[in-house]
């Protein structure tokens, strides 16, 4: 009986030792895998930084050059309007991105600043707010001016179309995709009308 109990105790101790050995062998790999999953990889961090830089980066666009309205043709006026629209959208994007680029403010450190520096910061904030307000006003005025120019361009285009119709030219005939057959037909009609008029004038 004692021999059986001793044998059972030896088996239990052997099994527990084997289990502890297996646990010690598996723990480094499991710990390493847990560390790898818990810590972000360098590639993920770089990807996040590149995404943030792409989001905050706005490509520079030069300011549009002034144009003389009296000497410019229709195509030049359209290009000027498109350039100004692109520049306005660029300024709006820059205003939206500006708060995200600014570093976070350490308010605890600012509490210990002297009153003179606080006063200067307050004045700078007021100046920036005023500049932003003036920029918004300028953008509104620029949009209104572009709208007036667009309306004037449309009016001039309508007047030109009316004059072309008065001289017998249709808008479809003056298109760039007009083929030679249509042109010949138009000239034949014009010549036939001229001949009819000349014959009518020559008849007694």
Image (cartoon, rainbow, N blue to C red):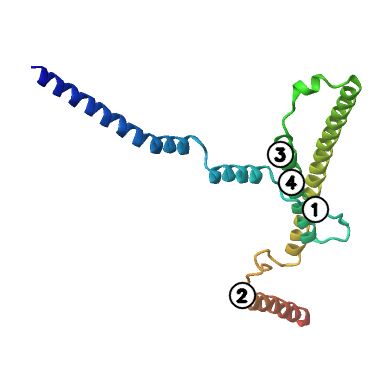
190 w.r.t. 57: above or below: below
Image position, residue 140 (x, y; %): 80, 38
Q: Quadrant of the N terminus?
A: top left
Q: Disc 3, disc 1: CB below 8 Å?
A: no
Q: Earlier in the sequence, mark 2 or mark 1?
A: 1
Q: Residue 87: where, in percent of width, then height? A: 77, 48
Q: Nearer the viewer, mark 4 or mark 3?
A: 3
Name the element at disc 4. helix
Nearer the observer, disc 3 or disc 2? 3
Q: Residue at x 88, y 57 (%)?
A: 68
Q: Between 153 and 143, which is closer to the camera in this rendering?
A: 143
Whole-number angstrom distance, CA of label 3 to CA of label 2: 51 Å
Q: Which label lies toward us, 2 or 1?
A: 1
* Residue receiving disc 2: 179
* Tag in front: 4 or 2: 4
Q: Residue at x 81, y 61 (%)?
A: 73
Mark sitting earlier along the chain (4/3): 4
Can you give x and y, in whole percent of width and height, for residue 129 in the image?
Answer: 83, 30
CB atoms of marks 2 and 1 within 8 Å = no
Task: Point out the frontmost of discs 3 and 1.
Answer: 3
**SS for dot 1:** loop
First in sequence: mark 4 vs mark 1: 1
Tell me whether the residue at label 4 lies in contact with that at label 2, contact meaning CB atoms closer than 8 angstroms. no
Which residue in the protein does label 3 denote? 97
Front residue of 19 and 98: 19
Identify the mark nearer the N-term, 3 or 1. Answer: 1
Q: In the picture provided, is 137 more to the left or to the right than 181?
A: right
How far apart in space, not on screen, are marks 4 and 1 (Cα)? 10 Å
* Quarter of the image that includes the C terminus: bottom right
Q: Which mark is residue 90?
A: 4
Kindly identify which residue carries mark 1: 62
Specify the label residue 156 is tagged with: none
């Amino acid at each position: 009986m004692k021999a059986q109990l001793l044998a059972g105790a030896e088996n239990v101790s052997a099994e527990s030792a084997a289990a502890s050995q297996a646990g010690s062998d598996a723990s480094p790999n499991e710990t390493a895998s847990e560390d790898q999953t818990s810590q972000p990889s360098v590639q993920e961090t770089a990807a996040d930084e590149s995404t943030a830089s792409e989001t905050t980066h706005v490509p520079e666009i030069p300011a549009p050059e002034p144009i003389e309205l009296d000497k410019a043709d229709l195509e030049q006026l359209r290009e000027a309007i498109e350039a100004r629209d692109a520049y306005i959208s660029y300024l709006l994007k820059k205003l939206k991105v500006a708060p995200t680029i600014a570093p976070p403010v350490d308010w605890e450190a600012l509490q210990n600043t002297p009153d003179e520096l606080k006063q200067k910061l307050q004045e700078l904030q007021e100046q920036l707010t005023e500049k932003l307000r003036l920029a918004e006003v300028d953008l509104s005025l620029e949009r209104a001016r572009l709208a007036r120019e667009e309306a004037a361009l449309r009016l001039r285009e309508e007047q030109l179309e009316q004059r072309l119709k008065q001289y017998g030219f249709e808008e479809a005939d003056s298109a760039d995709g007009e083929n030679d057959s249509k042109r010949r037909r138009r000239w034949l009609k014009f010549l036939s009308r001229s001949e009819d008029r000349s014959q009518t004038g020559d008849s007694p």
